[in-house]
Amino acid sequence: MSAVPATTKGAATRELIIDRAYAIACGEGLEGLSIGDLAQAVGMSKSGVFAHFGSREDLQLAVLDSAGQRFGESVLIPALRAPRGLARLRAIVDGWFDWVRDNRQGCLVMGAVSEYDSRPGALHERVVALIQRWRSDSARAVGMAIDSGELRAGTDAHQLAFEIFGIALALHQDTRLFDPKQARVQAERAFERLLAANSPP
Amino acid sequence: MSAVPATTKGAATRELIIDRAYAIACGEGLEGLSIGDLAQAVGMSKSGVFAHFGSREDLQLAVLDSAGQRFGESVLIPALRAPRGLARLRAIVDGWFDWVRDNRQGCLVMGAVSEYDSRPGALHERVVALIQRWRSDSARAVGMAIDSGELRAGTDAHQLAFEIFGIALALHQDTRLFDPKQARVQAERAFERLLAANSPP
DNA sequence: TCATAATACGAACGATCGTGCTATTGTACG
DNA sequence: CGTACAATAGCACGATCGTTCGTATTATGA
C-alpha cells in the first residue's frame, strides 16, 4: 500500500500496523480500535505495537491521517487527470461514489465525524480539518466548472458543495442500511438533477 | 418527559435511567455509554441500574427506542397538525432542522447509524427499522404533496425523500463541525431548490 | 565484525468494563 | 399491621483496557 518503501525497519512495521488498524477501524470505528486486538491482528505483542505510538490517541491520529491520504489518492488524485471543469467535477463525484461502494465496512472518515463531532480534542480538530479541506476541494472543482461556463454564472460553489456532500452522506447510509445498488442509482440521479438545476441557460 | 406517570416505582426509575442514558448517549454514542457512568449520573449503584435491564444491549435498545420516540413526538406529531400536502412536508423538514439544531450534542439516532450500520446484531436491525420508518414517513408526506398537486405529477417520492435525507445529514454534520447558522441557511436553500425543481409547471 | 542504537517482548500495573450473587432496604396490599 | 415481593445496594468475578518498565533481540553504521 505504501508507494515508497520505508528506510528503516521500524517505519515499515509502523506502516503495517497502520494498515491493519485502518482495516479494523473501518468497521469498528477509531474508538472501537483497541491496541490488544490490533497487536493480535499484526502478530505482535501489545507493547510492541504501542511503542510505535506514544499513546492510543497518537495511533488514532495516525490512522485518521492515513484514511485521509487513502481517500485523496483514491478519489481526488485520479480526478485531477480529467480536464478542469464539469468533467473533473464528475470524476470527483464518481470516484467518491465508488469509494463509498468499495469501502464496504464503512468510510473511516465519515465514521470519525460521528465519533468526534461533539467531543473536543485533537481528533476533533483533525476531523474538522479533513472535512474542511475536502469541502473546499469540492467547492474549487465546482468553481472551475463555473469558470468554464459549464455551470451557470451565478452558481454558489459552496452551496453546491454542501449539497453534493449531502448526497454522498445519504448514499453512504443507504449503502450500508439498505440496498447499495438502488442507493447508487438514487445518488446519481440526485447529482444529475443538481447539475441540471445549475446548468447555464 | 413521560406523558403518563408510571404505575410502579420501578417503572418510574427505569424511565429516569433511560432519560439520563439518552442525554449521555447523545454525546458519547450508544457504544460509549457505560453502566458505571450512568449509575453515577442517576445516583444509583451499578447493579441497581443494571437490574432494570437484563443486559447492556437491552439498555441500549431501550435508549434507542426512546430516542426514536422523542424524535417522533418532536418532529412528526407536531407536523401532522399541518394540512396534508406541501404545508405538512415543510413542517416536517422544518421540525427536523430544528431537531438537529436543538440536539447540540448530536442526534442519537444518526450516531447509532454510524455505530451499527455494518455491525450485525439486534441494534443494527433496530436502527434499520427506525430509519426505514422515518424514510417512508417522509416519502408519504412527499406523496401527499404530489396528490394535492403542489408537486409535479411525475415526481418520485422516494427519490425526493432520499435527497431530503441527504440535506438533513449534511446539515447535521455542518452544524457540529462548522457554523450552525450558516449550515441552516444552506440546508434551507437546498430544500427550497429541491421543491422548486419539482414544482408543477 | 563489532558496538550501538533501534526494535520487540513479557510481565505487571491500576482502572474500568459487564455481569452475577446475596443481603438489605423499601413499598404495597391483604 | 404484617407479610410478600419488588427494588436497590454491596461485593466480587474474570476480562480487557491503556500504559509502564526492564530486558532481550535484532538491525544498522563505522
Image (tube, coloured by chain):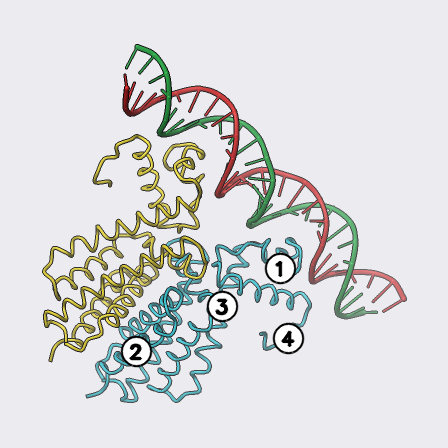
Chain colours: A yellow, B cyan, C green, D red
Residue at image mark 4:
B5
Q: Separation of disc 4 and disc 3 at Cα?
A: 19 Å
Of the residues shown, which amino acid type is indicated by label 3?
Ala
Q: Separation of disc 1 and disc 2 at Cα?
A: 43 Å
Q: Which of marks 3 and 1 is nearer the N terminus?
A: 1
Asked which secondary structure carries label 3, the reply is helix
Of the residues shown, which amino acid type is indicated by label 4?
Pro
Q: Residue at x 23, y 58 (%)?
A: A96
Judge depth for marks 2 and 4 and give the one in front. Answer: 2
Q: Which of marks 2 and 3 is nearer the N terminus?
A: 3
Judged left or right of residue B145, residue B42 is right
Residue at image mark 3:
B67
Q: Separation of disc 2 and disc 3 at Cα?
A: 25 Å
Q: Mark 3 lies on which chain?
A: B
Residue B123 image point, x, y percent = 45, 58
Q: Which residue is drawn at 31% across and 37% down?
A: A16
| In-front residue for pair B42/A138 | A138
Q: Separation of disc 2 and disc 4 at Cα?
A: 39 Å
Of the residues shown, which amino acid type is indicated by label 1?
His
Residue at image mark 1:
B52
Residue at image mark 2:
B191
